[in-house]
Image (cartoon, helix red, strand yellow):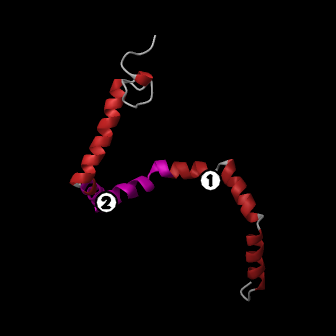
Amino acid sequence: MPNQRGKGGNGGSGAPPGDSFAERIVSEGGRGARRIAGVTGIDQLIEDAIVRAVESETTERALARIINGRIVTQAVEEALASERVEQAVIETVDSEMVDRVWARVLQSDET
């Protein structure tokens, strides 16, 4: 039986069939909020606040703790032990670039 509310089964809103009323409201609300943020300059204020936070000494210390911490160390160790890294090293060693570097080293006076 056809939907009595309008074409497409969505009340004539132009939304794809199957989008619930709640999904359409949230979607429209999100677009409206973005437009309001742009008009009022809130988006620029938020961007500036993020930049200040990233540039702060507190953020720098936090990132240093993360980078020097166990999680990053473990991730690097796992990456270095992976077959993909091993294959990349083998391909690099077998490259023409390495041959040229060795040729320069052997031709230099410092060998």
Q: Residue at x 32, y 33 (%)?
A: 26
Q: Does the magenta stretch include residue 69?
A: yes
Q: Residue at x 41, y 16 (%)?
A: 3
Measuring from the top left, give residue 63's x and y in whole percent: 38, 56
| Front tag of 2 and 1 | 2
Kindly indicate the quadrant of the structure image that contains residue 58.
bottom left
Farthest left residue? Answer: 40
| As drawn, 61 above or below 108 | above
How many numbered circles are shown? 2
Classify mark 1: residues with Cα within 10 Å, few (<14), some (14-19) or many (20+): few
Measuring from the top left, give residue 59's x and y in whole percent: 32, 57
Q: Which residue type does callout 1 highlight?
A: Leu
Q: Which quadrant does the C terminus fall into? A: bottom right
Measuring from the top left, give residue 6's x and y in whole percent: 38, 21
| As drawn, 31 above or below 80 | above
In the image, taking residue 40 as reference, residue 66 lies left or right, namely right
Kindly indicate the quadrant of the structure image that contains residue 103.
bottom right
Q: Nearer the viewer, residue 10 or 19?
A: 10
Q: Which of 22 and 74 is in front in this view?
A: 22
Circle nearer the N terminus (2, 1)? 2
Measuring from the top left, give residue 86's x and y in whole percent: 70, 54
In the image, taking residue 1 as reference, residue 27 lies left or right, namely left
| As drawn, 2 above or below 79 | above
Q: Residue at x 30, y 46 (%)?
A: 34
Q: Which mark is residue 51?
A: 2
Q: Residue 67 carries which label?
A: none
**Circle 1 sits on which residue?**
80
> In this picture, which residue range is highlighted in magenta?
45-72
Kindly indicate the quadrant of the structure image that contains residue 56.
bottom left
Q: Which residue type does callout 2 highlight?
A: Val
SS assignment at label 2:
helix
